[in-house]
């Protein structure tokens, strides 16, 4: 076959310089028929072979085809690869050729036999307000200084493309419902159809085709907000490809670098700001921004109910001898005076409220896992005051002590040096009780001043705190209208005397 340069030479030699075909053939080494064809036709380059010869592999082609045809009835993850076919040919049939030749033939044969053909997708243009997709992802954040594993709830409108992302400590059903409730409020309404994987928190059993047996609680939630759930075919996550992409996008953009926050509420507020900022984005093929499409979409959404779904779990139990109640295999403390009494617990996705009758007696941040203890130190300080020897080993104190400023440790050592271990510990516990009545920063500031002044009693610390928190007008009273002033409260003299 002639090259482009040879084609140009042949035509120039004949048309411009008048050389004969025989002479050109002698100069180029091509046959006269090739020279004539170059003079008669346009250059068309090389022609691909209609059939690919496999000189060494040829006797084995039927064997390879038989193995590949047999793969049609086998699971996708247990079918022949080109490498496996090459090794079988070598070990079972004495093949002496190259692996490259086997790979080239297997690639073509799989296409010819309908194996390994890539999926083809349909370009879509969804209607506004009709559908949204839901999925979970994993991420990490630094909360209150601790590296924390979190679950990321994601919802994405198929029409406007607007994302919604929030983090939760788990993927439980209560977290799933809470994510929906927040998302509906964020979008300003409810989508007619929501598309899911076959979530275990929603689907009790996958039946044939599109049929699903749903959990009763999920059916109640669905009925309250009046959306229709649609579930993907097993293993076909691309059927909700928009939110699949959102999970990766949020993890790469919203969570890089790894965000730091005081708590989960602060982190989720940051994620909401990121979702709102994404609204300035313009999707490919769309003339309007995500926010502009989302504003139009609100008109097509189902209205929100008058009241959000009561997403809570109730428990009942008896306060044990450690003044704790058990909620979902974890312990939560109550004041010691309720030990032995029956209590009712209401669990939300992020906190637990504990009631005795109609009275709320404690609130705790909710924890997940097994045998974790959420202890409020103030519930135990009165008991520890009566048993000061238990101070060092008391679990609520040990948990609280990890976050103490250094000034509290100095005050404890000073009290114990001046009054002895037992009395000094009691005095220090009385200082700790001040945290329940006053702002934490004010107490710490008063303790720092007490340490500098080398005071040796809790009463002195309290007097410093009182002087800091009482306004100057309350301390210094004008006597210009002394006749109208109320009589003095002499009971305060006892407290002042005890502090001196």
Image: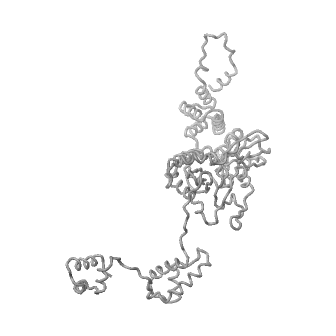
Which percent across, then down, holds residue 190? 65, 49
> Does any portion of residue 327 appear in the rendered image?
yes
Which residue is drawn at the image coordinates 56% and 63% (left, top)? 122
Q: Nearer the viewer, residue 350 or 18?
A: 18
Which residue is drawn at the image coordinates 28% and 78% (left, top)? 7
Outermost residue to the left: 17
Which percent across, then down, holds residue 233? 64, 65
Q: Left or right: where does residue 483 sit relative to residue 94?
A: right
The part of the image, by quadrant, that contains residue 499 is top right
Q: Which of 135 and 43 is in front in this view?
A: 43
Is the residue 206 above or below the residue 337 in the image?
Answer: below
Is the residue 229 above or below the residue 115 in the image?
Answer: above
Is the residue 97 above or below the residue 125 in the image?
Answer: below
Q: Quadrant of the C terminus?
A: top right
> Does any portion of residue 267 appear in the rendered image?
no
Which percent across, then down, holds residue 156? 58, 53
Q: Which colour scheme is used?
A: one colour
Q: Quadrant of the N terminus?
A: bottom left
Is the residue 71 above or below the residue 429 in the image?
Answer: below
Which residue is drawn at the image coordinates 33% and 78% (left, top)? 41
Q: Which of 478 and 399 is in front in this view?
A: 478
The part of the image, by quadrant, that contains residue 412 is top right
């Amino acid at each position: 076959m002639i090259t482009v340069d040879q084609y140009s030479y042949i035509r120039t030699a004949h048309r411009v310089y008048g050389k004969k075909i025989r002479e050109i053939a002698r100069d180029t080494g091509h046959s006269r028929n090739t020279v004539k064809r170059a003079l008669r036709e346009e250059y068309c380059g090389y022609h691909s072979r209609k059939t690919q010869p496999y000189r060494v592999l040829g006797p084995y082609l039927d064997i390879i085809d038989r193995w590949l045809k047999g793969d049609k009835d086998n699971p996708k993850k247990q079918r022949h690869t080109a490498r496996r076919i090459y090794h079988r040919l070598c070990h079972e049939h004495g093949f002496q050729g190259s692996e490259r030749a086997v790979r080239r033939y297997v690639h073509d044969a799989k296409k010819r036999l309908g194996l390994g053909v890539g999926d083809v997708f349909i370009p879509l243009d969804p209607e506004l307000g009709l559908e949204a997709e839901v999925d979970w992802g994993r991420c990490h954040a630094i909360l209150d200084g601790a590296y924390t594993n979190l679950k990321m709830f994601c919802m994405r409108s198929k029409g406007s493309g607007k994302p919604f992302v929030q983090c939760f400590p788990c993927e439980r059903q209560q977290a799933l419902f809470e994510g929906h409730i927040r998302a509906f409020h964020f979008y300003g309404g409810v989508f007619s159809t929501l598309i899911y994987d076959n979530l275990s928190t929603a689907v009790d059993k996958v039946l044939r085709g599109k049929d699903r047996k749903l959990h009763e609680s999920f059916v109640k939630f669905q009925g309250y907000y009046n959306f229709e759930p649609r579930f993907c075919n097993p293993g076909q996550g691309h059927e909700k490809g928009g939110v699949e992409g959102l999970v990766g996008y949020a993890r790469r953009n919203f969570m890089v670098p790894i965000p730091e926050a005081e708590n989960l509420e602060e982190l989720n507020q940051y994620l909401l700001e990121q979702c709102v900022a994404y609204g300035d984005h313009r999707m490919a093929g769309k003339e309007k921004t995500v926010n502009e499409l989302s504003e139009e979409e609100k008109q097509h959404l189902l209205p929100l109910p008058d009241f959000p779904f009561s997403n809570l779990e109730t428990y009942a139990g008896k306060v044990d001898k450690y003044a704790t109640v058990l909620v979902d295999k974890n312990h939560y403390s109550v004041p010691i005076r309720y030990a032995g009494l029956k209590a009712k617990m209401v669990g939300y996705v992020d906190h637990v409220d504990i009631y005795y009758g109609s009275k709320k007696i404690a609130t705790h941040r909710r924890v997940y896992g097994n045998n974790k203890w959420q202890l409020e130190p103030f519930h135990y300080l009165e008991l520890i005051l009566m048993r000061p020897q238990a101070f060092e080993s008391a679990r609520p104190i040990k948990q609280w002590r990890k976050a103490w400023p250094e000034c509290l440790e100095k005050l404890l050592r000073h009290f114990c040096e001046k009054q002895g271990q037992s009395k000094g510990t009691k005095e220090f516990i009385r200082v700790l009780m001040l945290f329940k009545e006053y702002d934490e920063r004010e107490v710490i500031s008063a303790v720092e001043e007490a340490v500098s002044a080398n005071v040796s009693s809790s009463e002195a610390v309290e007097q410093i705190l009182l002087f800091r928190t009482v306004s100057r007008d309350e301390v210094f009273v004008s006597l210009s209208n002394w006749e109208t002033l109320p009589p003095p409260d002499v009971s305060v003299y006892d407290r002042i005397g005890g502090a001196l």
